[in-house]
Image (cartoon, coloured by chain):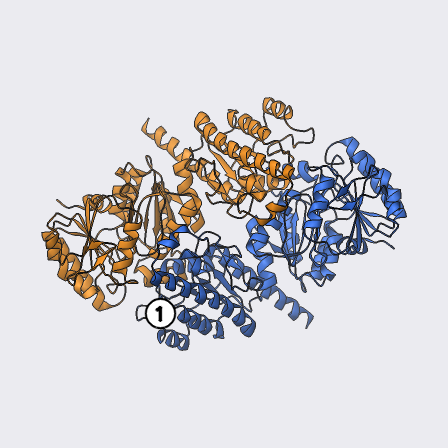
Chain colours: A blue, B orange
Amino acid sequence: MENNGVKAVEALFNPRRMAIVGASANLGKWGNIIPNNILRDGYKGELYLVNPRGGEIKGIPFHRSLAEIGKDIDLAMITIPAERVEGVMEDCARAGVKVAIVISGGFSESSPEGRAMEESLVRKARSLGIRLVGPNTMGITSAPWSLTALMPPVQPRPGHVAFAAQSGNLGTQMLGWGSYRGIGFSRFVCIGNECDLDFADYLEYFARDEETRAILLYVEGFKRPRRILELAKEITPRKPIVIYKAGGTGAGSRAAASHSAAMAGSREIYRGMIRQAGMIRAETTEEMLDFADALVKLPVARGRRTAILSWGGGWAVVAADLCERAGLDVNPLPAQVKEELASILPSYWSKGNPVDMVGILDLDKHVRCLEILSQCPEYDAVVSLGTINAAGAFGLAGGEAESELLGEMEKARRFYVQQRSANFARRVVELMEEQGKPIVTVGMPQRDADSNNLSGYPWDRISIYTNPERAARVAAMLAERGEYLRSIAAREA
Amino acid sequence: MENNGVKAVEALFNPRRMAIVGASANLGKWGNIIPNNILRDGYKGELYLVNPRGGEIKGIPFHRSLAEIGKDIDLAMITIPAERVEGVMEDCARAGVKVAIVISGGFSESSPEGRAMEESLVRKARSLGIRLVGPNTMGITSAPWSLTALMPPVQPRPGHVAFAAQSGNLGTQMLGWGSYRGIGFSRFVCIGNECDLDFADYLEYFARDEETRAILLYVEGFKRPRRILELAKEITPRKPIVIYKAGGTGAGSRAAASHSAAMAGSREIYRGMIRQAGMIRAETTEEMLDFADALVKLPVARGRRTAILSWGGGWAVVAADLCERAGLDVNPLPAQVKEELASILPSYWSKGNPVDMVGILDLDKHVRCLEILSQCPEYDAVVSLGTINAAGAFGLAGGEAESELLGEMEKARRFYVQQRSANFARRVVELMEEQGKPIVTVGMPQRDADSNNLSGYPWDRISIYTNPERAARVAAMLAERGEYLRSIAAREA
């Protein structure tokens, strides 16, 4: 019990000293690429590089062995060929290593001999009190330590989503996609073959981790489904867990068996388990990020009553359909709200929910409308379309060349739109805080529509979606999360 | 019958001479913005500007009246206030105008008086042999004439999708989103209030138009649903029609009634009609573009047997699930294919469909695998993941600053990936032509993942999706379109 799973995971994500066993001076080798990624992002602990033949990377000389370092090492990252991994376990133990990440492939994922080698490695490590991540993993990241111990050249953004992925390519690409969209991660682990530490261990740690406000799982199959169910039931009343369960179909589960040796299990069984544990199911890969991000940045909704605010009529119609289809109530406007809006908008506004602002260019009026809807006690959430990154639609975001063709007047107009649109974004954040209600925003579809490249925006506090489909799904998810939390509170009262 | 609907639409999209009635020298007025948009994109016909008070835009002097032009005008675009529109109809008639686009709002969409004014305008125009687009429209575009007669600063890309939209904000933003994604349009019309020319007229013209290879409709409600059904039945065996039907829910249809005065009709009735007519239903706004674009660029599938090729295992699992869920058959690999692939891939490849290329960096082997799957007579389509715009994932697309930190070796590696990835894209196009089968490609999620900003790609011939969800839906749509065409052929044989 001394080095139990969650303690090992704690060392994994908070290593004061780590060593790369198999460091290489040869460009293109993983033993070279991984240390370079770690150095690029400025790991706050001490990094040691080990290779018996010597060498250096960026001025850091290699040690001939772990013993030569002469200090206790928390984390070893092993990039040497599979056959030799077991052989360095004793050195690791002598250096005080608590957990080792085995990057190397060629174990159970590749052949029966590989499987035997993996089993032998686990026995050896366990006997020495060392816990293992992988093998066949692309690595980990840990934001508080600025640690990017990954194979691909992805630069994750620091934030509050913890992510455990049963796929290196999918997991690391999600990190990269998140950086682009302004979605940050507290911790990431590519679980690899799960020979030792598994989903349950990571989950248990994420639950306790103060840096983590939402948990994201990409799962092909669980090794210990009962333990996961038990843990998830404990965690979800306090911290949301978003799960994408892959391999639910015939072809998908055959693929999962080949990819991660996971017993994918039937779709229905997993769905039942997800529901029972209060986890949130993402139906698409895009939704994994949409949901996790919204749960970090937006409050949950107190109910399903949703007001829709749109710059134009077509998007208003589409959003109304999609919100209803997602299970939200697009209730009529209360008389008082109708009156207030009528005093702001032109006579030909929609006079109903969705509120169609009929294209008015005065963005300060957009803010006023948003305030009225957000402050109305008869709505639990607002979906807002068109205003949030209006600037981009006027050619401001992507640096379109046409700008030199513009007259001064047009330039002034665009500057105004950019400024007022950023102001709208800031008010979205303030109103969410004041009212404790989510405001889900859809920008104009355009270049970089969901990226964080517009200046003056409170990127750590808003989520922008490129289309109303995604916004409606997020708003519905936040309503369901609210219902779940209330049902738990009622049960406990 | 002389100036019937389809003839008027022909004049609308092929105007040798057009006049803006209500041209303005004042920046910020629509009568100034629209001519500037037209001049920016280099309209190939003759543009005349009319304003009784005189003035000029970019060196084009205003005429005091249509009569002063002294030439026959095909198309008039009217930007003067609603009350005065009817008053210029006689001038239009004398100048030979066949069709007039009434940009002005303030008609039936805004008040009962506006409705009366609109009805009176239509009577007047009809009596003079003039057909009307709008009122309350954002305009039209026509690629063969390089004509961008629009209110917003959108620059559409020329191509082969014809698009009629019952919403200006949604329609024009789709054009802009299309430009970014490399999706081109032959013709576009924002139908406005449909006081005269309606969906049926535009549809009839698009069917005959040689520039148009796929038709896209954004519909809140049809004025002449029977005529549409009749026309669509005739058209869909030759040209695909993609339709997004908005306003199907309670809130959505109330919003549609307020927005376009459309009787949205029940979702079931419209679904029945869409199916009966062989139209293709887009379920999201994103799908409108995905489907229309694929139908222009990709061949339809001869069946549902789908091979999946993936650079990595996680995406392979996800894609297999999504393809099966979309109704495709992810059949096992034939023995011969398995043997051929085994001779190329490392021993630990997936040995099944999906084909997981287990991360190998030799992109020429990716091409070889694609060829084998595409040439196999037991597959009707290929979904390919990860290779197509691999370059972006290595920091090449977005011009990430980190590149200066790279060594020469890493730069060379990235250059190689960029070159080979573009080569893969070219082979995708060649194989589709050779084999007459669709290859639906998913790029790495990254900055600009579905934009057309990578050089060396045959952008007019491929569609790249940012996630496997979209690719699976497109592949299934192409299989359904193939089935529909075969059922028609069988019926006619």
Residue B282: % across, % down: 42, 47
Residue A11: % across, % down: 79, 55
Residue B43: % across, % down: 26, 46
| Residue on which disc 1 sits | A351
Element type where label 1 sits in the image = loop
Q: Is residue B149 visible?
A: no
Q: Is residue A145 visible?
A: yes
Look at the picture and state if A328 lies above or below B295.
below
Left or right of A59? Residue B168 is left
Going 78% across and 56% down the picture, which residue do you hit?
A10
**Residue A109 vs residue B460, the one in the foreground:** B460
Q: Quadrant of the C terminus of chain B?
A: top left
Left or right of A417? Residue B142 is left
Look at the picture and state if B313 lies above or below B123.
above
Going 37% across and 76% down the picture, which residue do you hit?
A339
Left or right of A53? Residue B313 is left
**Residue A383 vs residue A360, the one in the foreground:** A360
Q: Quadrant of the N terminus of chain B?
A: top left
Q: Residues within 10 Å of mark 1 (few under 14, many from 20)?
A: many
Look at the picture and state if A115 lies above or below A482.
above
